[in-house]
C-alpha cells in the first residue's frame, strides 16, 4: 500500500511540475505577443514570473524590449526581478535605455533597478542612454545614482565620449550638466571632443565647445611602461 501511495504522489508531483512549466511557457509567450489580457489570466495562477529562457532572458526583458508599458507594470506588480540579468549581464534597464524609453526607465528605477549595473564589456545604462541619445533618460539615471564619469573596461570610454561620437548634442549637454568630465581621455588618448571631431559630429562638437572644451585639443600619447612601450592601444576605438 505504501508503494501505491508513493507512486500516486510521484505522479501528482510530476503533473504539477509539468503544469507549472506549461504555465511559465504560456506566460513567456503572452509577454512576447504583448497579450496583456492573457497575461492577467495567467498571473492569477501565480506562475513563476522570473522563469528565464536558456540564455537568462526573462519575461521582463522581453516586455521592455517590446516597449510594452502595460505588460511591464503587470510583471513588476507580480514580482518580476528588475535586476535580472541574462548571460551577457544585460538587465531590463539596459534594454530600456537601448530603446530610449523614458517611461520604462522611470518604472524600472523606481522598482529598484541598479543604475550602475554594466554588461560583461562594462557598458553601463548611462553609456547606453548616451549612445541612443535620450537626454531625459540621462538626467533620470543620474538622479537615481548613475555615476557620470565611469569608463567601460576595454577602451576606457565614458558616456560623454559615446554621446559625442553619435552626435547626440542633447545628451552631450545633459551629461555635462550632470558633471561629465570634458577632459577625460580614453585609453587611446581621445577626449569626447576628439571623438566627436573624428566622427564628424558637428552638433555634438558645437555643444562641447560651448561648454568649454579646448578647441586646440589633441590626442595625448599614452603613458609608457618600463621599456618605453605603450600600455594600451595607440588609438581609441569608436564607441559602439
Image (cartoon, rainbow, N blue to C red):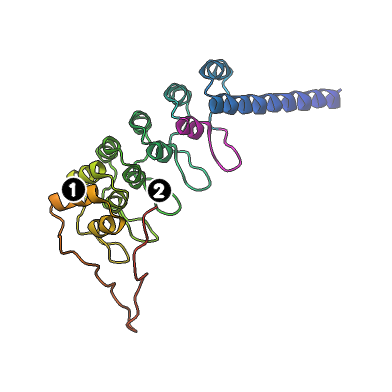
Reading the image, the residue beneath label 2 is: 118
Instruction: Provide residue 126's location: percent of width, then percent of height.
Output: 32, 44
Identify which residue, 206 or 32, lies in the foreground: 206
The local secondary structure at tag 2 comes to loop
Identify which residue, 206 or 185, lies in the foreground: 206
Q: Residues within 10 Å of mark 2 (few under 14, many from 20)?
A: many
Question: Can residue 173 be seen from the camera position used here?
Answer: yes
Instruction: Provide residue 178's location: percent of width, then percent of height.
Output: 20, 44
Q: Residue 101 lies in what quarter of the image?
A: top left
Look at the numbered discs 1 and 2 and tell me whether their residues touch, using CB distance below 8 Å: no
Q: Which residues are magenta?
A: 51-66
Asked if residue 109 lies left or right of residue 210, the reply is: right
Q: Where residue 98 is drawn, which disc sits there?
A: none
Identify which residue, 23 or 65, lies in the foreground: 65
Asked if residue 56 lies left or right of residue 124, the reply is: right
Reading the image, the residue beneath label 1 is: 207
Amino acid at each position: 500500500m505504501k508503494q501505491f501511495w508513493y507512486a500516486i504522489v510521484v505522479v501528482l508531483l510530476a503533473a504539477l511540475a509539468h503544469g507549472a512549466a506549461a504555465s511559465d511557457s504560456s506566460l513567456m509567450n503572452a509577454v512576447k505577443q504583448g497579450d496583456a489580457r492573457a497575461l492577467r489570466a495567467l498571473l492569477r495562477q501565480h506562475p513563476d514570473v522570473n522563469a528565464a529562457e536558456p540564455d537568462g532572458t526573462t519575461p521582463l526583458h522581453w516586455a521592455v524590449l517590446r516597449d510594452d508599458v502595460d505588460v511591464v507594470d503587470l510583471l513588476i506588480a507580480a514580482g518580476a526581478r528588475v535586476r535580472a540579468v541574462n548571460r551577457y549581464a544585460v538587465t531590463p534597464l539596459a534594454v530600456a535605455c537601448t530603446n530610449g524609453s523614458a517611461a520604462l526607465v522611470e518604472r524600472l528605477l523606481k522598482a529598484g533597478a541598479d543604475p550602475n549595473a554594466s554588461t560583461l564589456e562594462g557598458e553601463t545604462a548611462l553609456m547606453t542612454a548616451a549612445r541612443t541619445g535620450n537626454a531625459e533618460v540621462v538626467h533620470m539615471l543620474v538622479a537615481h545614482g548613475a555615476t557620470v564619469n565611469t569608463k567601460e573596461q576595454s577602451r576606457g570610454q565614458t558616456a560623454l565620449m559615446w554621446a559625442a561620437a553619435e552626435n547626440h548634442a542633447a545628451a552631450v549637454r545633459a551629461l555635462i550638466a550632470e558633471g561629465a568630465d570634458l577632459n577625460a581621455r580614453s585609453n587611446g588618448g581621445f577626449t569626447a571632443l576628439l571623438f566627436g571631431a573624428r566622427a564628424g559630429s558637428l552638433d555634438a562638437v558645437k555643444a562641447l565647445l560651448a561648454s568649454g572644451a579646448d578647441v586646440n585639443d589633441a590626442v595625448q600619447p599614452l603613458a609608457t611602461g618600463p621599456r618605453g612601450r605603450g600600455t594600451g592601444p595607440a588609438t581609441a576605438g569608436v564607441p559602439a
